[in-house]
Amino acid sequence: MKKNILMLYPEVPSTYWSFKSSLRFAGKKAQFPPLGLITVAAMLPEKYDIRLVDLNVRKLTDAQIRWADLIFVSAMIVQKQSFHEVVTRCKSLGKTVVAGGPYPTSSHAAISGVDYFISGEAERVLPEFIRDYENGSARHIYRDTERPDITETPVPRFDLLEIDKYFSMMLQFSRGCPFNCEFCDIIELFGRKPRTKTPEQFIREIQAVYDTGFRGSLFVVDDNFIGNKAEVRKLLPYLAAWQKERGYPYSLFTEASVNLADDPELMDAMIDAGFDMVFLGIETPVEETLHKTQKAQNTRKKLLESVRAIQNKGLEVSAGFIVGFDTDPENIFDLQIKFIQESGIIMAMVGIMIALPNTQLYRRLEREGRLLGETSGNNTHDLDANFITVMDKRTLQEGYKRVLKTIYNPKNYFERCKVMMQEVPRRSRSKRPLRWQEIRAFLSSLVVQTFSSYGLQYLRFLMYTLRTAPALFPEAVRMAIMLHHFRSITGKLVKDHGKTLRRALRSARRALETNRIPQPALSHHEE
């Protein structure tokens, strides 16, 4: 029985991760495509007619919804507001909604309006759901209790994408991570035994991207690319040969654990395959906190030494940092700023700790009676932790804002850029000629940033690069454009939070004046 399937990807809010403020420089609409949805699309029967609408790329119309027999929606927790809006709209038009992905998997009990849930990984349970649905006997929830063999996962349907609207493409090689960090939900979703695709399978997928005509940035989305080092070592020679044969059409980046620094041969192989950046979960320079949160892999050597080892091999390091741990010392904000500046990590994603559903941290805080509710999933913008923090709430919020304002101050940011360019060997850069997209981005940057509040610092940085390392000029332009995004987001975050605080203070004063609440004032845990 033929079905019309409409796949919907909810909007990602404007955050540090969305890069919305800088995408327009390159004429793009979204940073990444919905890899999960186009992978699920490849698992559906060939007789189905499938269309995809990414709300980050274009608006959804009622006509598109009415065309469909089934609506598939996938979302991360940070997309939950848009997710609920999409589901409500589809139900108002009488449509059947199927939901999957990280947010529906972890929070299905709190979600209304969804007819069927595909919980967890889809490879095993999706065919079962399709069979039952066609037979009229589908259950509300389908959940696979075993981890699927992803060597059987089909090549994603890249043909469903408006490919020219995205800045970067995405591929996946593995799922799962061998570590046991208390606050991480990856091990809950995908397990601690990393499962990988075969080298031949991954090459088929990157060839599928190549066949679309897309060139440029490609994100290998594994939460820990080196979780299974033996399999990664098998893949990299295949990938290097493929890239060399085609003149390195892709600049690759991925996520990895800090112990990558202990394996110089593996880093050499990654660079040979075209990797030029890696994201690390550094979290904090406080060793006590790393031990308490079961992130001991970050304590085997000094973190700054590990960052330098990776940079010196030729990989730019970006990283995640967190404030709001139970064991944060009073000077945690200064420690984070100092580490970020010294390390030359230009893309430093700092967030306030949140307790994600179905994590060890969530369960511990629940036992301790410290949970305050569900999180928005946006730890860089939601300044209210969803649990009672050890640190005073106002101190945490103001310290966090100070970190952001300091590290994305143009002077400090460009100093980090210089450190990065000095530490990362030039041999890993510019394997291919400039593309029109990069030239367009530079021209847009020149017009917008020259006349910004930091225009003089911007021009000095570009001139510094031309004088000291002209081969890295495209990298300098990329980093300058990133600053535009980071400053836009930081300014909005600080301004919005200031308005929220002022409204709260005005409300408190009015309440006190009319004796609606008793004195003394509420504690920070009750604010």
Image (spheres, rainbow, N blue to C red):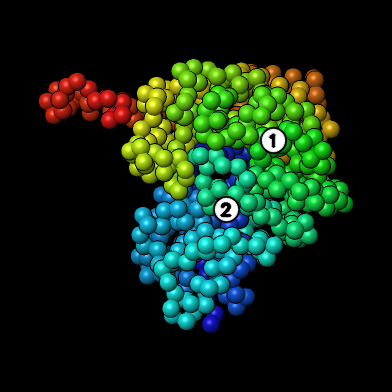
Point out residue 158 in the picture as x, y percentages from the top left corner: 66, 60
Residue at 35%, 65% in the rendered image: 92
Bin the neighbour count of mark 2 within 10 Å (Cα to Cα): few under 14, some 14-19, many 20 and up.
many
What residue lies at 37% left-to-right and 23% top-to-bottom?
Answer: 392
Q: Nearer the viewer, residue 193 or 224?
A: 193
Instruction: Please report contact status of discs 1 and 2: CB closer than 8 Å, yes or no.
Output: no
Q: Residue at x 51, y 56 (%)?
A: 101
Q: Locate residue 377 relative to residue 448 in the image: left or right.
A: left
Question: Tag on residue 190?
Answer: 2
What distance separates the C-alpha of mark 1 from that of mark 2? 20 Å
Amino acid carrying label 1: it is Asn
Residue hosting label 1 = 259
Q: Quadrant of residue 497?
A: top left
Residue 98 location (% of width, % of height): 46, 65
Mark 1 burial class by Cα count in 10 Å: few <14, some 14-19, many 20+: some
Instruction: Of the two numbered discs 1 and 2 on the same chain, state the one appearing first in sequence.
Output: 2
Q: Residue furthest left?
A: 515
Figure quadrant of the C terminus: top left
The structure residue drawn at horizontal position 68% and vertical position 26%, both measured from the top left corner, is 301
- SS for dot 1: helix
Amino acid at the residue labelled 2: Phe
